[in-house]
Amino acid sequence: MPEDDAATVRPLRADQLEPALRVIEAAQHLAATGGDLNDTLAGLARQLTEFIDASACLISRIDLERGTVNDCAGYDMSRTTRPL
């Protein structure tokens, strides 16, 4: 597989460890809380966007049986975090 292949899984660099930990903690918080799911997903979208240095992130639920996709939360680099 070519080294620049986007699908290649690589070990984290030292500067990526703290952001990765924040994403893991956000996912754990999501699983442990009974709070507002969409607000928690919006925070997770923000952390994922920052971790992978993306311009935006959209979290959706996919229902394979019904063939539907429902957007739950999103974040874009204009610093807008919102449940959908």
Image (cartoon, rainbow, N blue to C red):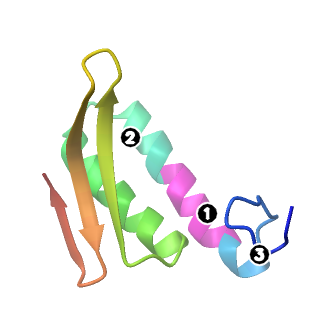
Give the residue displayed 45% in from the left and 76% down from the top. Answer: 54
Q: Is residue 18 visible?
A: yes
Q: Nearer the viewer, residue 81 or 29?
A: 81
Looking at the rendering, which quadrant does residue 1 occupy? bottom right
Label 3 secondary element: loop
Provide the residue designation for mark 3: 4
**Residue 32 covered by magenta stretch:** no
- Percent across and percent down for residue 23 are 52, 57
In the image: residue 72, left or right of residue 12: left
**Above or below, comparing residue 63 to residue 74 in the picture:** above
* Res 78 quadrant in image: bottom left
Q: Amino acid at mark 3?
A: Asp
Q: CA separation, marks 3 and 1?
A: 21 Å
Circle nearer the N terminus (3, 1):
3
**Front in this rendered view, residue 57 or 14:** 57
* Marks 1 and 2, the one that precedes in the sequence: 1
Up/down of 79 relative to 59, above or below: below
Is 1 placed left or right of 64 in the picture?
Answer: right
The amino acid sitting under disc 2 is: Leu
Q: CA distance from mark 3 to mark 2?
A: 33 Å
Callout 2 secondary element: helix
Tell me where residue 14 appears, x and y as whole percent: 77, 77
Q: Nearer the viewer, residue 1 or 62?
A: 1
Instruction: Report which residue position mark 2 lands on.
Output: 30
Tell me if 44 is positioned left or right of 3 in this view: left
Tell me where the magenta segment starts and ends, as one range. Answer: 17-25
Q: Residues within 10 Å of mark 2 (few under 14, many from 20)?
A: some
Q: In this figure, which residue is indicated by the disc labeled 1? A: 20
